[in-house]
Image (cartoon, rainbow, N blue to C red):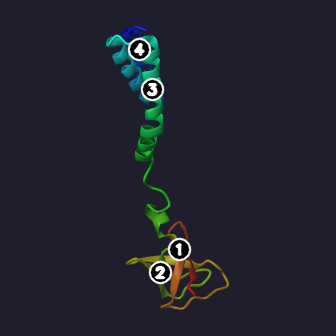
C-alpha cells in the first residue's frame, strides 16, 4: 500500500477517536502512521500490515490500560462532598437526642439531630454515628 493511504487511514481513525474518546482508535491511528513510515521506507505490503498489527497489539495491550487507568475518575465513596461526607462520621451529643429533636456536634459544627430509631433517647455527652442526613437534620445512632 502507498504511504498516503496509511496516512488517510490514520487521519480517519484520529478523527473517530476525537468523537469516541476510547483511546483505542487513537492507538490504531498511531499504528497506521507506523505502517505509513514502513511504506515510505519502501517495505512491501506484508511488512506494512505486520508493522500495523504489531504496533496495534502493543498499543492496545500495553498502552490502553495505562491510559484508561489515568482517565478513571479518582473520586468515589472515599471522596464524598457536602453533607454526604458526614454520613458515617462520629458525633458527640450536645443536647439529648430523641426521635423528634436534639443537637449533636459533628467535626466542630453543631447540627440538629434525631435518633435513627425513634424509640431511643440518647443522653448528652454520648458518642453517636451519623447514619443519614435529612435536610439539615442528622439521623444518629448510639455507638456501642
- The answer to whether the residue labelled 2 contacts the one labelled 1, judged by CB atoms less than 8 Å apart, is yes
Residue at the (46%, 21%) spot, across then down: 50
Q: Position of residue 44 (x, y in %)?
A: 42, 11
Image position of 75 (left or right of 134): left
Q: Position of residue 100 (x, y in %)?
A: 60, 80
Residue labelled with disc 3 = 28
| Mark 4 or 1, nearer chain start | 4
Residue under pointer 2: 91
Q: Residue at x 47, y 34 (%)?
A: 60
Residue 23 visible in the shown view: no
The Cα–Cα distance between marks 2 and 3, rounded to whole angstroms, is: 54 Å
Q: From the image, tell me which residue sits under label 4.
A: 6
Judged by depth in the image, the label closer to the viewer, 2 or 4, is: 4
Q: Residue at x 38, y 13 (%)?
A: 43
The earlier-in-sequence mark between 3 and 4 is 4
Q: 16 or 141, which is in the foreground?
A: 16
Vertical arrangement, residue 89 with respect to residue 39, above or below: below
Residue located beneath label 1 in the image: 138
Q: Mark 2 near mark 3, Cβ–Cβ under 8 Å? A: no
Q: Which residue is painted at 42% across and 53% down in the image?
A: 74
- Mark 3 is surrounded, within 10 Å at the Cα level, by few (under 14), some (14 to 19) or many (20 or more) other residues, namely many
Front residue of 98 and 68:
68
Quadrant assignment for the C terminus: bottom right
Label 4 environment density (alpha carbons within 10 Å; few <14, some 14–19, many ≥20):
many
Label 2 sits on a secondary structure element that is: strand
Amino acid at each position: 500500500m502507498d504511504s498516503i493511504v496509511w496516512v488517510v487511514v490514520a487521519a480517519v481513525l484520529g478523527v473517530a477517536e476525537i468523537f469516541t474518546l476510547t483511546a483505542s482508535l487513537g492507538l490504531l491511528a498511531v499504528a497506521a502512521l507506523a505502517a505509513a513510515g514502513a511504506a515510505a521506507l519502501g517495505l512491501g505490503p506484508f511488512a506494512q500490515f505486520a508493522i500495523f498489527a504489531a504496533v496495534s497489539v502493543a498499543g492496545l495491550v500495553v498502552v490502553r490500560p495505562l491510559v484508561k487507568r489515568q482517565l478513571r475518575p479518582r473520586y468515589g465513596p472515599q471522596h464524598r462532598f457536602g453533607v454526604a461526607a458526614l454520613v458515617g462520621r462520629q458525633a458527640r451529643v450536645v443536647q439529648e437526642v430523641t426521635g423528634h429533636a436534639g443537637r449533636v456536634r459533628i467535626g466542630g459544627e453543631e447540627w440538629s439531630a434525631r435518633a435513627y430509631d425513634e424509640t431511643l433517647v440518647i443522653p448528652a455527652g454520648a458518642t453517636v454515628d451519623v447514619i443519614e442526613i435529612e435536610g439539615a437534620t442528622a439521623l444518629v445512632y448510639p455507638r456501642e
